[in-house]
Structures are given as structure tokens and as C-alpha cells.
Image (cartoon, grey):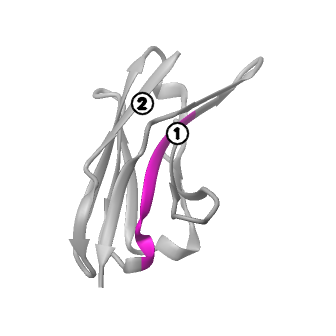
Amino acid sequence: QVQLVESGGGLVQAGESLRLSCAASGSGFSIYKMGWYRQAPGNQRELVATITSGGSTSYADSVKGRFAISRDNAKNTIYLQMDNLKPEDTAVYYCNAKFQGFRLLDYWGQGTQVTVSP
């Protein structure tokens, strides 16, 4: 069992930066593929970025070059550095942990609001 707690959201102006954190409790953090997803009002939840247990990263096209995902296994924490924020980045951002073993382990945080004003 893994519990995820996001922090770092807030209200910023376009062009500014935020760094989100997701702290995990429970065992085996380092084996999980971690990700950030977001959901804007009226939209489906969408993938923003992922990072594997080995540190490989991938990004949605809409955030490439502006966002950076990282992980610190010693702190059981992942981060999402968001630069040059745009109003269309406004959403609730969720942290996710996945591990495919005999069965899929799939955990979500409660979300943190990011609002970008024009």
C-alpha cells in the first residue's frame, strides 16, 4: 500500500514557475513508475509526465520543454518543475504510482490545484 500526498500548487501568473512535490509513504517506492496527471474542469484526466524506476522520463507534447519530472528515492518523493506556465495549464494535478507485478498496483494522491492567470 502506498499513500501519496501532493503539495506546491497555487495561483501564479502566466510565465511564472511552480514546483509540485509528491511524498509517498509505504514500502517499495523505488520500484514504482511515478507520474503526474492533471484534470481541468470539464476535461478528462490527462497524462503530464512520467518517470520510471530507472529514471527514464516522458512528457505530454503540451508541456515538453517547460516541465521537468524528477524523483528522489531517498526521500520517497517526486517533483514536477513547471516553468513558463500558461493559463491552459490550470488544472488539478494528481500524483500516481504504478507497479505491474502479479497484479497492477495503482495509487493516486488527492490532487493539488494549479491556477495560472493570464
Q: Which of 98/88 is in front? A: 88
Q: Which of 35/3 is in front? A: 3
Q: How far across and down, in percent of the image, does residue 82 sit?
A: 33, 65
At a point 53% along the width and 15% down the height, the residue shown is 1
In the displayed orientation, state which residue is furthest to the front.
Answer: 42
Q: Does 23 appear in magenta?
A: no
State which region is magenta: 88-97
Q: CA distance from mark 1 to mark 2?
A: 8 Å
Q: Does 96 appear in magenta?
A: yes
How would you classify the magenta stretch by its main secondary structure?
Answer: strand
The quarter holding residue 77 reads top left
Say which residue label 1 marks: 96
Element assignment for label 1: strand
At a point 53% along the width and 75% down the height, the residue shown is 62
For the image, the number of numbered tags is 2
At a point 40% along the width and 68% down the height, the residue shown is 90
Q: Which of 20/90 is in front? A: 90
Q: In the image, which disc is placed on residue 4?
A: 2
Q: How far across and down, in percent of the image, does residue 89 sit?
A: 42, 71
Element assignment for label 2: strand
Q: Earlier in the sequence, mark 1 or mark 2?
A: 2
Q: How far across and down, in percent of the image, does residue 3 sit?
A: 44, 23
Whether pointer 1 and pointer 2 mark residues with C-beta atoms closer than 8 Å, the reply is: yes
At a point 31% along the width and 51% down the height, the residue shown is 20
